[in-house]
């Protein structure tokens, strides 16, 4: 049975039964700590992207090393979790959202797995920005756990961090149709597509981005409740992925290679 990959966000440090911790060094450097174990008998590699004790802050995450570690370990499917801000009044703090698209406002470098090569690799992020099979598995599982608080679509704007957005930035994002704002989905999702790995994520808003504040004491409670339900959802979702892969992710590299022409 193939391993499923899981990337956990803030506060998500433990997941597996009988985990074995290791670090996977590869051509892109050192990955975050990884854990091999099982969930109800399903073999899983789990990577908390901020490290086991949240010591790896957003700009220091080695996204390329993390995704390439999964690639070299033979992982073909990755589920991820994120805590985010909500710009949509209908997506309340504590709800679960399975985004169907993203907009990249990051300026991080490198921006590709292949930017050190002499050939141009252009992966297509359409017709679906995320794996449709994994999205369906997450949506179905989330509706079992949170039937009244699951949103099956949403556009996430991914900003650089570490600061939050200015009032005018938030105004612009809302005008453009933003539902969620996060910091860590990208370039993670793009690198997964460049590696021809299926990727989808589930988000929980932990704050509002339209001037409505939550009590600071509520944050740890909201996050703890979300993580508990994330574990239930992932336990269901990993058992419901199709046996065969014939999605856009599996074919991402079929027509992605273009030879560069040297300028004379």
Image: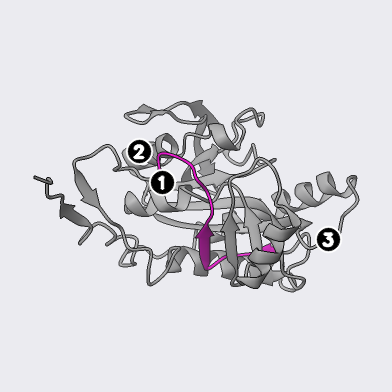
Magenta segment includes 255: no
Query: Who's the residue at 47% across and 47% down the image?
Result: 188
Going from the N terminus, do you reach mark 1 or mark 2 first? 1
Q: Which residue is mark 1?
A: 3
Magenta segment includes 99: yes
Going from the N terminus, do you reach mark 3 or mark 2 first? 2
In the displayed structure, does residue 202 sit left or right of residue 104? Answer: right
Query: Who's the residue at 37% across and 69% down the image?
Result: 126
Disc 3 residue crowd, few under 14, some 14–19, many 20+, Cα 10 Å = few
Q: Which residue is mark 2?
A: 73
Question: Where residue 207 sits in the image (x, y, percent)?
Answer: 78, 55
Residue 211's tag is 3
163, above or below 194, in the image = above
Towards the viewer: 36 or 124: 124
Nearer the viewer's eye, disc 1 or disc 2? 2
Residue 67's tag is none
């Amino acid at each position: 049975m193939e391993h499923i990959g899981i990337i956990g966000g803030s506060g998500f440090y433990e997941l597996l039964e009988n985990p074995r911790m290791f670090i996977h060094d590869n051509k892109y450097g050192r990955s975050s700590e990884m854990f091999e174990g099982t969930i109800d008998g399903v073999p899983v590699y789990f990577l908390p992207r901020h490290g086991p004790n949240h010591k790896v802050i957003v700009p220091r995450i080695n996204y390329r090393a993390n995704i390439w570690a999964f690639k070299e370990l033979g992982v073909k499917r990755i589920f991820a979790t994120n805590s985010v801000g909500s710009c949509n009044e209908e997506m309340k703090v504590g709800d679960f959202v399975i985004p169907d698209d993203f907009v990249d406002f990051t300026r991080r470098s490198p921006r590709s797995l292949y930017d050190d090569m002499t050939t141009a690799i252009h992966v297509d992020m359409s017709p679906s920005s995320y794996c449709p099979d994994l999205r369906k598995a997450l949506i179905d599982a989330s509706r079992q756990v949170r039937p009244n608080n699951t949103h099956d679509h949403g556009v996430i704007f991914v900003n650089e961090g570490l600061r939050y957005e200015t009032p005018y930035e938030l105004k612009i994002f809302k005008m453009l149709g933003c539902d969620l704002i996060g910091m860590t989905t990208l370039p993670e999702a793009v690198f997964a597509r460049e590696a021809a790995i299926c990727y989808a994520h589930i988000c929980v808003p932990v704050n509002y981005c339209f001037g409505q504040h939550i009590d600071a004491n509520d944050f740890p409670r909201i996050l703890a409740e979300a993580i508990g339900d994330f574990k239930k959802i992932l336990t269901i979702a990993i058992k419901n992925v199709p046996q065969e892969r014939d999605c856009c992710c599996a074919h991402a590299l079929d027509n992605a290679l273009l030879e560069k022409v040297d300028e004379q």
